[in-house]
Image: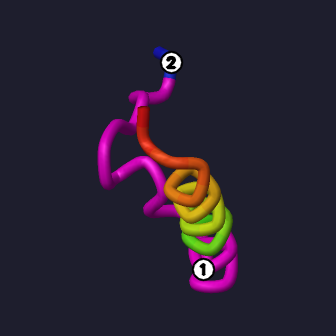
Amino acid sequence: MPPERKKGTNKYDNLSDTQFKKLIRKQYKYIKEVAREGFF
């Protein structure tokens, strides 16, 4: 039986604190870049 696919907030439950912080930082930088370019 295939493992259950995690969706939503459960998707990243298995990340360590360090990995999670890196992910959030990466996403934050991406959002800042999009905001700087402007929303279309």
Q: CA distance from mark 2 to mark 1?
A: 29 Å
Q: Secondary structure at mark 2?
A: loop
- Read off the residue under disc 1: 21
Range of magenta residues: 3-22
Q: Between residue 19 and residue 28, name the one nearer to us.
A: 28
Q: Is residue 2 above or below residue 24?
A: above
Q: What amino acid is labelled 2 in the image?
A: Pro
Q: Earlier in the sequence, mark 2 or mark 1?
A: 2
- Look at 34% across and 52% down and name the residue there: 10
Which image quarter holds the C terminus?
top left
How many neighbours does mark 2 have within 10 angstroms: few (below 14), some (14-19), or many (20 or more)? Answer: few
Is 39 a magenta residue? no
The scheme the figure's colours follow is rainbow
Is 18 a magenta residue? yes
Quadrant of the rendered image containing residue 19: bottom right
Residue 17 place in picture, x, y as percent: 58, 84
Residue 8 place in picture, x, y as percent: 31, 44
Left/right of residue 35 with respect to residue 4 in the rendered view: right
Q: Between residue 8 and residue 5, name the one nearer to us.
A: 8
Q: Is residue 20 above or below residue 31?
A: below
Q: Secondary structure at mark 1?
A: helix
- Look at 48% across and 28% down and name the residue there: 3
- Read off the residue under disc 2: 2
